[in-house]
Structure formats: structure tokens, C-alpha cells
Image: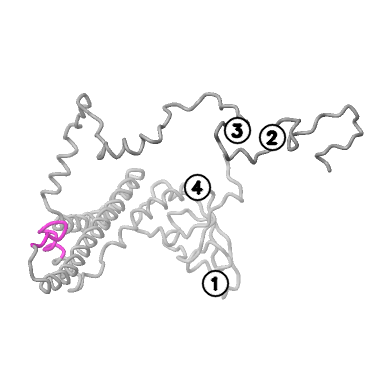
Amino acid sequence: MSSTRDELRHVMLGSLFTPEVPLGSTRDILITCHVSATDRGKLHGSPECRTLRSAASVNQIDVPFGEAVARICPSCRWPLPTNSFILPLGAAVSEVDSLAIWLDRESKDEEDLEAERDAAIALAAGEYLPRAAESGDAEEEDDDAAGRDEEWERYDRARNFRSRRHEHWRRLHSYLTRSNEAVSEYPFLATWADGLQSRLATVLDEERRAFAALVQPIRLLEAAAVRVLPEPALDRSHHRSPRPAHPTARLWLTSGFPVPTTAPQHPEQWNPAPPRGDTRALGLHSLSPRHENGPPNLSADRHETSRLTT
């Protein structure tokens, strides 16, 4: 499928490709460049580049990518079709070139080295502060409590330091892995990428050893052993439900208020008749039509006024 002018990506080729980067078959791809009338200086991706403002006139030319790399303007963006082979190659070059940011970094200062040594000493004794023996002196216990708070903070700092060290080590490992995948896609990049990858591998090994100094070997052994241990089988044949803590209390609570085992299927009809011997029902209205408080008799005359409406 041929791309249209709307399907373009503007890429800063000068920040990705240098004359040292192998280009493979992409070196023969023509790219559109803009150059001053004298045909000297840099090649630009747009005639609006500020470097070309002083030029009397600007020419547009098509140049093979391999020839243009040495003269590409580092601040210009080139409009490339989305199906151009230069785009995936540029992504692979970027994965390898990003390794350089982790090299030649500033060395650790004395404060960082001291924090790393203190973390190693603290974690060598255990993951957490050992439990202190109790003493009978209250004032001495208060002083010990204040000192233990500081020790707890020390262990917290040590564990956080180790966690950051592990995260940094894994981050470097992911960068190296992605660069290896990029080189596997474009094997002609191997000779150029080998120097950066070898240097990062050395840094990666230093970070691994620094992290290992903060981990107790017994913890690693336990973690490795758990992965191969068989899953424990739970025998439920002799399982019994636990007895209530106070059986007499339960009997006392339920003896006076029996709880039905099942809910009634049909609700009982409400019986408006008062029970015998219930004096509270004496003041209720009677349901007999002959009683003065009872309901009125139905009259045959529909025009007769009912007592209920008076």
C-alpha cells in the first residue's frame, strides 16, 4: 500500500544517525533535502530552517540517505512516509544509542559510599532490628526505646537502599536486553553496538555485585528452595468444627427466645379478634354492626348519608 502525503512522520534524522552508524540497505533510499544555492553546508529537511534564512535562494534536491548522513542538519525534521525503512532502523539505533546515558556517569561521593557500607552492615545482621531483652529499670527502658527508634530508621534506610539498588540493576538489564533485540533485527549494527553493549555489561555486573552485597545468602537459598518444595496436602478427614467458647451462655440466650429452624412458607392471617383475658383490647372498636362503635349497616338507599362521612 503506497503512502500518501498525509501519512508522514517528521523525524530528526541528525539526532539518530551519524557517519559511524551502519545503514545497510537504507543507504540507497532517496530523501528530499533543502540546501542553499551554493550547494554547500548542511542538508536541511525544511526550507524554513533558520540556518537557511540568510541564503539568497534555496534548492530542493533528492540525495541518497548514505551520502546525506554526513551533512544532515541536527535540528531539522524530515518528513518520511510511515512505511519508510528508515523509521524502524532509527528505532533500533535509538535503543542501542540510549545505552550511552548509563556510561561515564559521575562517580559516587563519600556520602553515598558511607550509606552503602552502613546498609550492608545492618542487613548482614538481619532484615529487621533484633528484639531487645527487657530490663527492670524504667528510665533505662525509655533510653533504650529512643535508641531503638533510631535503629529501626537505620534498618528502614538499609532496606530502601537495597530496593533502589535492585531497581537500578534491573533497569540497566532491560536496556541491555532491548538493545540486543534491536541488533538481532538488524545484524549489520552489531559491530557498531558491540562497544556500547560491552561497556554496559561491565557496569551491569558491578551493579549486580553491589546488590548481592546487600542480600543474605540464606534468604536466597530459602527463596530458591520454596520454588521446588511440593505443595502441602491438607488432610480434612479428622477436621472438626471448633466448639463454642461458652456453651452455657448460648443456651441462656436461646432458651427464652426459641429461634425457628426454617422460615414459615406462608404468612399467618392477622386475627383482629382480641385474645381472651387481654385487657388492652377493651378500648378497641368493636367489629359488630350492632355496637355503637362498630361499622354501620349497609342501607338500601344509596342516597342515605353514611355515619362514616358525618
Decide which of tag 4 and tag 2 comes sooner along the chain.
4
CB within 8 Å, label 4 to label 2: no
Which quadrant would residue 35 be assigned to in this image?
bottom right
- Residue occupying the point 38% across, 36% down: 256
- List the residue tagged with mark 2: 286
Front-lying residue, 45 or 160: 160
Assess whether mark 2 and mark 3 are in contact (beta carbons under 8 angstroms): no
- Give, as a single range, the part of the protein colored magenta: 119-133
**Relative horizontal placement of residue 194, taking residue 229 as reference (left or right):** right
* Gap in angstroms between the C-alphas marked 3 and 4: 96 Å
Give the distance between the C-alpha atoms of the residues marked 3 and 2, in whole angstroms: 10 Å
Residue holding disc 3: 274
Q: Residue 50 shows which numbered tag?
A: 1
Q: Sequence order check: which comes first, mark 1 or mark 2?
A: 1
- Residue 23, label in figure: none
Residue type, mark 2 in image? Ser
Query: Mark 4 Cα within 10 Å, few/some/many (few <14, many 20+)?
Result: some
Is residue 154 one of those drawn in magenta? no
Circles 1 and 3 in contact, beta carbons < 8 Å: no
The N terminus: image quadrant: top right
Do residues under tags 1 and 2 come within 8 Å of each other at their CB atoms? no
Amino acid marked by disc 1:
Arg
> Splitting the image into 4 quarters, where does residue 52 fall?
bottom right
Element at label 4: loop
Classify mark 3: helix, strand or loop.
Answer: loop
Q: Indicate whether residue 122 is drawn in magenta.
A: yes
